[in-house]
Amino acid sequence: MALVTKAVKGTKDALPAEIHKYQYIEATVIDIAEKYGYKEMRTPVFEHTELFQRGVGDTTDVVQKEMYTFDDKGGRSITLKPEGTAGEVRSFLENGLCNETMPQKISYVTPCYRYEKPQAGRLREFHQFGVECFGTQSPVADVEIIALASRIFENLGIKDLSLEINSIGCPKCRAKYLQALREYFSARQDELCNTCRDRLERNPMRILDCKGPICSEIASHAPVVIDYLCDDCKEHFAKVQDYLKAMNIEFTINPKIVRGLDYYTKTVFEFLSGSIGAQSAVCAGGRYDRLVEELGGQHTPSLGFAMGLERVMLLMEAQGSEFPAPQVPDLFIATLGDKALVKALEISEDMRAEGFATVLDLNQRSLRAQMKYADKLGATFNVVIGDSEVENSKAKLKNMSTGEETEIDLTTFVNGFYNISLSQQLADLEINGEEFDFSSLFGTGENKEQ
């Protein structure tokens, strides 16, 4: 078979056999965010290019090298979102959330697009979870979003993460730091790469992020921002540390963590792992007290974080974290004959209406082939319905894990199935001595009446 085309480089299909992993992670992050008061918001996958030039920064690699940008049919420059924050801020302003009671606490799960070299944990299309907290300058907010991220990792069973924090100060104290950087790097300007020479005057903090071996070695001895903090920034950072200690969240101070754009202020942080190679950062965040203002709003101190969900999954798989088992059908109905098929269609809809996942063979294969199909699906129970079962209104319901068969009345099939499955679960509880999950008594749906 010759395919017309294949998936675009840097993209990945989420197949049915693993989709439950994605769903589990997404449901977990949204649920935990809600427990901290963050409500989900969804914004378009593309925006006007200017938003990212202002909101991400036109001196960053993301804007200069990695964005998917094109002109639409109206001649407007459009960009597929490379990250989530800028769109959330735009929506916060455009939809008047900025006029509501502060703080406004927002979460999101969104696809993002960056043209960079695909590798483990880094795709050109990836999915990002993030939170944004608008309208508070309190260090309590800094600690809360760090705690939120930490809780997510704990609930997902991710271990051995290290939290690193830093403060990059405010415009007042950072001006002195930038001057110190310029003086330091100017002394070795001839050794810098061409990109970093260009950054020297425009944005010397970006030199600290250069991955080139020579620039990295030079940057390793550069002045650190924490030595230039004003009294207000020092106090803020000290409170962040005190509150983290009070919440028993371990951290280390890494003065090398920086953000190269003026609207980032004070606290920055990263969660790092040694389990996924070079892509060690699984979550990054901090304050951007001047971003809302940069995008046309009033001064609104804000903060947030983002994590790549594919990278989170990669980390979970590398560490052997547990995922819930994929959902399997509660019932498979095998049929023999036209009358049986009509009855099976009736029963299957009744079962689904009551929340039970029910499957029947759409290809009307032989009974043996249908049984192989049921086994492959992993159905919990199956029932074979032929013309004689329809005439007698009786059939045998088989528990596929135990092999036990129980007669069931086809005219009251749903009630009979419920009672049989309940009895089996209680029997399993007695045998295994496990704590019983009563929610499982009601199948996979939400329509059961107790």
Image (spheres, rainbow, N blue to C red):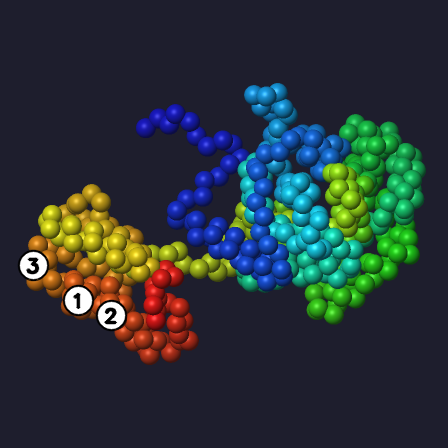
Crowding at mark 2 (Cα within 10 Å: few <14, some 14-19, many 20+): some
Residue 54 falls left or right of residue 409: right
Residue 216 point in image, percent of width and height: 78, 40
Residue 136 position in % (x across, y down): 76, 55
Q: Are marks 1 and 2 in contact (CB under 8 Å)?
A: yes
Q: Quadrant of residue 245?
A: bottom right
- Residue at 19 percent of width and 65 percent of height: 412
Q: Residue at x 24, y 63 (%)?
A: 414
Answer whether residue 281 is visible to the viewer in this image: no
Residue 213 placed where, x, y %?
75, 37
Residue in the foreground of this view, choosing between 317 and 132:
132
Residue nearest the viewer, comparing 261 with 122:
261
Report if the CB atoms under discs 1 and 3 are less than 8 Å apart: no
Determine which residue is flagged by label 3.
391
Callout 1: SS: strand
Disc marking residue 217: none
Q: CA distance from mark 1 to mark 3?
A: 14 Å
Q: Is residue 186 left or right of residue 404?
A: right
Type of the residue with mark 1: Ile
Q: Which mark is residue 420?
A: 2
Residue where numbered disc 1 is placed: 408
Q: Which residue is depicted at the point 78% across and 53% down?
A: 267
